[in-house]
């Protein structure tokens, strides 16, 4: 006869007793070995905390000898200072109240002074009459968990630091933006004040003439290079000029200032247009070009001389500037050619083109810088307004008084999207048309 599994049955009662004894001993040996070599630590303490039993696993973790622990140490002796404090204030009171605790984080100390993070579970064992006899504690090595938690904490701290850095950088960027905006506004205000100092505050009133002006700076962050002026020479004649210096910014402003005051002084010395432009040419060439820093401008300079017949004679000189435009009282529009005039300041001596015309009642003379004719009208680089379009525009509006011409051109420029991409100056001079007897208004 064989038992299930192929184990032979004992032949007699004596054999059965021997086998049962051996099996019992085997179970006892296996249980003890399992206890000692378990993957977790085991220890039993009396109710006062004295260690009564501890397995080899925990002893090996802590580097302790059994004979130095059992009966000689308390459970709290195996803990770090922080672990002892937590045990006395939380672990032990809760265990007495509840009789069992599971998965409590503690920290034990090793014989070499190291720290071993553990998770401890304890239960109070009672006697047959319900009295507490001992405390059994299971200890799990939490080093990997602690390392994981520490890594999570480190990453969280890194993330918090990165977030704080990002917030600080954002705040600094916002502060820098506000400061830049403040600086830009201050600069714009300063440039506006300086720009005004380079231009007349207002045009003087001319007897028998009407005037209007428009000035547009392409960038509020840079000084414009266009200029104009109108001033008396003597009791009968008036001088005017309009032009455009090369460059932008402070250097252009210095050139503009020098040009404006040179022309004013030259007009009082010799008011003929070619003479005034020649004087300016000599000053700019000597000041800049001869010293290796060529700077120049385009300019129209003119003299107004009202006549006794209601007409005003205009003598113009041009140095490389776009031609003046006439809007006649009879509805015609035409350029006043001044070909051949060179840029002012490039050569030591230069010829300047001159022209003479007369403004009859209802006629208007328009001077402009290339910011008008070179204003962009489309996305392509060559989508520019141009002189032909300007002439057609003038013909469509003639006859027109100076204020009407400037108003129409201002609306035209504002219709070009962002406006002119270069500084633009417009100066219109005209003889008022006779009043219409029916309305008493100029025609």
Image: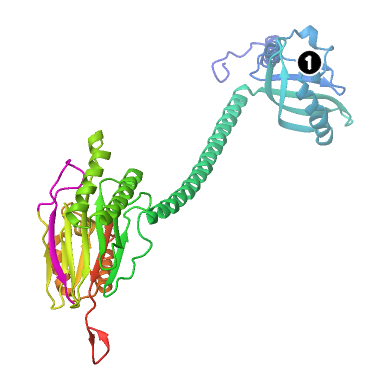
As helix, strand or loop, the secondary structure at mark 1 comes to strand
Compared with 40, 177 (above or below) is below
Q: How many labels does the image show?
A: 1
Compared with 394, 263 (above or below) is above
Going by the image, does 430 lie left or right of 52?
left
Examine the structure image and report whether residue 109 is included in the region drawn in magenta.
no
**Residue 344: image x %, image y %?**
20, 47
Where is mark 1, residue-wise?
53
**Residue 212: image x %, image y %?**
29, 68
Foreground of the two, 196 or 314: 314
Determine crowd level at label 1: few under 14, some 14-19, many 20+ residues with C-alpha closer than 10 A: some
Q: Residue 387 sits in which quadrant?
A: bottom left
Foreground of the two, 50 or 195: 195
Give the residue at x 25% y 46%: 246
Which quarter of the rendering shows the N terminus? top right
Residue stretch in magenta: 340-362
Compared with 49, 332 (above or below) is below
By secondary structure, the bulk of the magenta-drawn segment is best described as loop
Could you tell me if residue 377 is visible in this image? no
């Amino acid at each position: 006869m064989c038992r299930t599994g192929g184990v032979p049955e004992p032949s007699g009662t004596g054999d059965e007793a021997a086998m049962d004894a051996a099996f019992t001993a085997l179970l006892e040996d296996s249980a003890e070995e399992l206890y000692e070599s378990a993957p977790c630590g085991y220890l039993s303490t009396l109710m006062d905390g004295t260690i009564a039993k501890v397995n080899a696993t925990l002893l090996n973790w802590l580097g302790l000898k059994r004979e130095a622990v059992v009966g000689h140490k308390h459970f709290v002796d195996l803990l770090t200072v922080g672990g002892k404090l937590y045990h006395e204030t939380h672990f032990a009171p809760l265990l007495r109240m509840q009789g069992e605790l599971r998965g409590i984080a503690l920290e034990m100390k090793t014989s070499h002074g190291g720290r071993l993070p553990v998770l401890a579970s304890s239960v109070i064992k009672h006697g047959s009459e319900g009295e507490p006899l001992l405390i059994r504690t299971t200890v799990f090595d939490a080093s990997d968990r602690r390392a994981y938690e520490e890594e999570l904490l480190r990453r969280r701290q890194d993330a918090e630091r990165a977030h704080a850095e990002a917030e600080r950088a954002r705040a600094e960027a916002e502060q820098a933006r506000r400061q830049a905006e403040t600086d830009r506004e201050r600069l714009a205000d300063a440039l506006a004040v300086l720009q005004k100092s380079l231009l007349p505050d207002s045009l003087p009133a001319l007897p028998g003439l009407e005037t209007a002006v428009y000035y547009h700076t392409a960038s509020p962050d840079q000084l414009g290079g266009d200029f104009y002026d109108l001033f008396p020479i003597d009791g009968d004649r008036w001088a005017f000029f309009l032009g455009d210096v090369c460059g932008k910014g402070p250097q252009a402003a210095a050139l503009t200032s020098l040009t404006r005051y040179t022309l004013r002084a030259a007009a009082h010395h010799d008011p003929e247009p070619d003479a005034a432009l020649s004087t300016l040419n000599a000053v700019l060439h000597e000041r800049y070009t001869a010293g290796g820093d060529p700077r120049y401008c385009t300019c129209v300079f003119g003299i107004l001389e009202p006549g006794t017949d209601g007409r005003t004679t205009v003598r113009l000189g041009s140095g490389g500037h776009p031609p003046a435009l006439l809007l006649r009282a009879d509805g015609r529009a035409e350029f006043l050619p001044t070909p051949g005039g060179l840029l002012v300041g490039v050569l030591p001596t230069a010829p300047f083109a001159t022209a003479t015309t007369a403004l009859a009642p209802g006629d208007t003379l328009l001077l402009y810088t290339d910011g008008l004719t070179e204003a962009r009208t489309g996305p392509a680089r060559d989508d520019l307004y141009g002189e032909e379009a300007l002439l057609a525009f003038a013909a469509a509006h003639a006859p027109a008084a100076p204020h009407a011409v400037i108003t129409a051109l201002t609306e035209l420029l504002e219709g070009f999207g962002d406006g002119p991409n270069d500084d633009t100056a417009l100066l219109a001079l005209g003889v008022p048309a006779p009043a219409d007897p029916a309305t008493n208004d100029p025609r």
